[in-house]
Image (cartoon, rainbow, N blue to C red):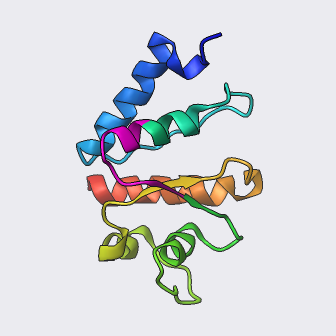
């Protein structure tokens, strides 16, 4: 039986995502709770095939998203809540492919707010 993510449509979706990443685009994927399994290994495999950076998982530990990301980048964030504009000025953040686990439903509102602010910051 063929894996769902190897079927033409889903495989093209993963290919399009990796092409956007290779072009330097920011990509946000939100899957429903009961999405077909296997998208993450499929995406990681495609990134590896294209010699692109590895997809790194960000754990949600209850801190604000910018602080979580800085911690993932090896930078101890200040105790105050940082804004996306401050994250964009951190060179260690540039060029990273990050994955936020979807099982952190309670954290989603703060991540959604972060993504809206981040999008506004990068698109002006």
Q: Residue at x 45, y 11 (%)?
A: 8
Over which residues does the magenta segment extend?
46-56
Q: Residue at x 44, y 29 (%)?
A: 14
Q: Quadrant of the C terminus?
A: bottom left
Question: Where 25 sits versus 121, above or below?
Answer: above
Front-most of residues 65 and 8: 8
Question: Where 58 sits versus 20, above or below?
Answer: below
Question: Where 34 sits versus 53, above or below?
Answer: above
Front-most of residues 119 and 78: 78
- Horizontal and vertical percent position of residue 105: 75, 50
Q: Is residue 66 left or right of residue 36?
A: left
- Horizontal and vertical percent position of residue 11: 45, 21
Q: Picture quarter containing residue 120?
A: bottom left
Q: Quadrant of the N terminus?
A: top right
**For the view shown, which residue lies furthest in the left direction?**
23
Front-most of residues 37 and 113: 37
Q: Residue at x 61, y 34 (%)?
A: 31
């Amino acid at each position: 039986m063929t894996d769902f993510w190897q079927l033409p449509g889903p495989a093209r979706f993963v290919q399009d995502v990796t092409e956007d990443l290779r072009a330097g685009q920011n990509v946000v994927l939100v899957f429903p709770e009961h999405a077909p399994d296997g998208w993450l290994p499929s995406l990681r495999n495609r990134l590896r095939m294209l010699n692109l950076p590895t997809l790194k998982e960000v754990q949600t530990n209850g801190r604000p998203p910018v602080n979580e990301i800085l911690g993932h980048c090896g930078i101890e964030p200040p105790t105050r809540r940082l804004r996306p504009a401050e994250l964009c000025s951190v060179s260690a953040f540039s060029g990273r492919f990050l994955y936020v686990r979807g099982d952190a439903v309670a954290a989603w509102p703060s991540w959604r707010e972060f993504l809206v602010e981040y999008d506004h910051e990068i698109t002006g």
